[in-house]
Image: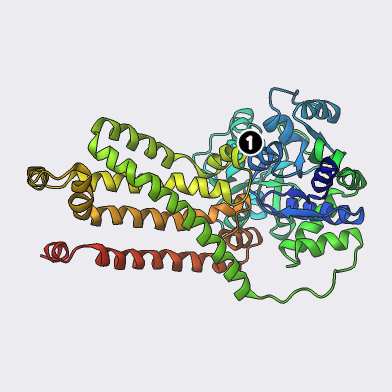
């Protein structure tokens, strides 16, 4: 009986699918969600979860059950070394099966990487292919951050064509089009189904050396969940060959320039009627929800940082050798890129608030540990000697004398950590943690300035509020005599 109940509950658990942080991936996820609903499956869609590395780790960890991916990304990046560069879908399926994963049939279109220039630049310089760029090393390249480091991205392309451009910058994919349109960049990478290609009159350069592999769109999914919930695989197979490259480009354009939601576009594609009147745009309710999420991320991570960082700072001050090692380790954590840290944490903590809080906690340690150590280490020796001469136990010396004397420095470190935390927490939206980062990332993707400001202004206001609170806290906690001496 208990086993039966356990299995029923597992079967009732909603399926979760993810999408990357660009319009096409979100549209495809909405198409699958709606198609699966026809088969009776309830699916939760975790939108805009960063790039391939984050979604891949989340799928393997079981945090999501499926997401849309491209064959070239699998062969060149995710399964590199396990399959040949020209691997057929059957070979991909065999390699994925060893990881407990499956691959659906092609959705019907190829969305390859390419390089593009403005129509004016192409006409002026006579650019038609990537090889033509060799004659123009002065051109400024603005490439998406993921493309900059991928095995099938800039490093390999640069070597294959012998490109020697002196200015190569990484930036968000959507912002790169704006840079090209405003002449702030000359060459960008693009996806061949991007709606911006026709809207901005971008000339796509021919890959005349056939560097880029095919990028057929497929669904990756967990085999165990597909067995539990056959509707998932049924929906994936129902979408086989349904979308052409031209259709995908039109769907992307409807979102990016038609200002329609991804859900609305997916409904139209599937021939579904809209599910009633669209809800009112309640910005106040949205802001309150995002504020709650952001405060949760910042508050819990800062509490953990205080509980760990303050004792570590005291230890670093009392034991200089240990202190050097502690400060070096916390400084090392500070240098880790947030996206890389998310990739490491997802297999351990899944997606959502937990890995975001863990990352923010790690990033908050350095200023707290450093300032605590510095504040205690710079106390005048004669004060320490006086306390020792009175025969006070070390714990009493620390609590009644040393910590009050070091309080201003310690609070400055905590304040710095909190302000950094408020800003860094916006990146939690990349792994489904919500907060102010969600409207910011969505606004960047859709080139929607009001939506960007909807997240950026409250985040800035919260940072200023944190500074004001710690300034007041410093005055409240600092003994009057020390306040007077600090003013003199």
Spot occupied by residue 46 in the image (x, y as percentages of width and height): 70, 53
- The residue wearing badge 1 is 153
- Residue shown at 70% from the left, 57% from the top: 196
The vertical placement of 458 against 209, above or below, is: below
| Residue 332 appears left or right of 300 | left
> Looking at this view, is 412 or 138 the one in front?
412
Viewer can see residue 380: yes
- Colouring scheme applied when the structure was drawn: rainbow
- Classify mark 1: residues with Cα within 10 Å, few (<14), some (14-19) or many (20+): many
- Residue shown at 69% from the left, 39% from the top: 129
Q: For numbered disc 1, what is the local secondary structure?
A: loop
> Looking at this view, is 108 or 283 the one in front?
283
Residue 143 picture quarter: top right
Q: How many marks?
A: 1
> Looking at this view, is 399 or 250 the one in front?
399
Image quarter where the C terminus lies is: bottom left
- Residue shown at 80% from the left, 28% from the top: 97
Image quarter where the N terminus lies is: top right
Spot occupied by residue 463 in the image (x, y as percentages of width and height): 42, 63
Viewer can see residue 210: no
Spot occupied by residue 160 in the image (x, y as percentages of width and height): 64, 28
């Amino acid at each position: 009986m208990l086993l039966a109940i356990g299995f029923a509950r597992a079967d009732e658990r909603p399926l979760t699918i993810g999408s990357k942080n660009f319009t096409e991936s979100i549209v495809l996820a909405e198409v699958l969600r709606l198609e699966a609903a026809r088969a009776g499956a309830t699916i939760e869609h975790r939108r805009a979860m960063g790039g391939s590395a984050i979604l891949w780790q989340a799928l393997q960890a079981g945090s999501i059950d499926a997401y849309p991916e491209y064959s070239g990304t699998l062969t060149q990046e995710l399964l590199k070394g396990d399959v040949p560069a020209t691997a057929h879908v059957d070979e991909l399926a065999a390699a994925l099966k060893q990881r407990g994963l499956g691959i659906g049939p092609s959705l019907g279109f190829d969305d390859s990487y390419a390089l593009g220039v403005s129509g004016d630049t192409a006409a002026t310089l006579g650019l038609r292919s990537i090889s033509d760029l060799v004659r123009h090393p002065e051109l400024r390249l603005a490439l998406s951050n993921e493309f900059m480091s991928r095995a099938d991205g800039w490093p390999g392309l640069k070597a294959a064509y012998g490109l020697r451009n002196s200015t190569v910058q990484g930036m968000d994919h959507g912002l790169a089009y704006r840079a090209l349109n405003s002449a702030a960049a000359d060459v960008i990478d693009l996806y061949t189904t991007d709606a911006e290609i026709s809207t901005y009159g971008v000339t796509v350069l021919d890959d005349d050396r056939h560097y880029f592999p095919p990028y057929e769109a497929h669904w990756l999914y967990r085999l165990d969940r597909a067995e539990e919930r056959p509707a998932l695989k049924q929906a994936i197979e129902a979408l086989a060959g349904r979308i052409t490259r031209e259709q995908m480009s039109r769907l992307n354009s409807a979102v990016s320039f038609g200002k329609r939601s991804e859900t609305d576009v997916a409904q139209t594609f599937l021939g579904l009627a809209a599910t009633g009147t669209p809800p009112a745009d309640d910005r106040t309710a949205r802001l309150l929800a995002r504020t709650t999420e952001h405060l949760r991320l910042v508050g819990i991570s800062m509490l953990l940082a205080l509980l760990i960082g303050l004792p570590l700072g005291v230890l670093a001050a009392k034991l200089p050798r240990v202190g050097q090692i502690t400060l070096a380790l916390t400084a090392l954590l500070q240098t880790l890129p947030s996206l890389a840290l998310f990739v490491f944490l997802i297999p351990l903590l899944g997606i959502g608030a937990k890995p975001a809080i863990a990352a923010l906690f790690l990033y908050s340690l350095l200023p707290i540990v450093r300032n605590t150590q510095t504040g205690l280490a710079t106390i005048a020796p004669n004060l320490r000697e006086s306390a020792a001469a009175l025969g006070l136990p070390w714990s009493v010396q620390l609590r009644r004398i040393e910590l009050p004397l070091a309080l201003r420095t310690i609070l400055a470190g905590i304040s710095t950590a909190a302000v950094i935390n408020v800003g860094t927490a916006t990146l939690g939206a990349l792994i489904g943690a919500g907060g102010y980062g969600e409207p910011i990332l969505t606004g960047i993707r859709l080139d929607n300035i009001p939506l960007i400001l909807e997240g950026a202004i409250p985040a800035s206001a919260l940072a200023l509020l944190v500074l004001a609170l710690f300034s007041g806290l410093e005055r409240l906690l600092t003994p009057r005599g020390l306040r007077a001496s600090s003013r003199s």
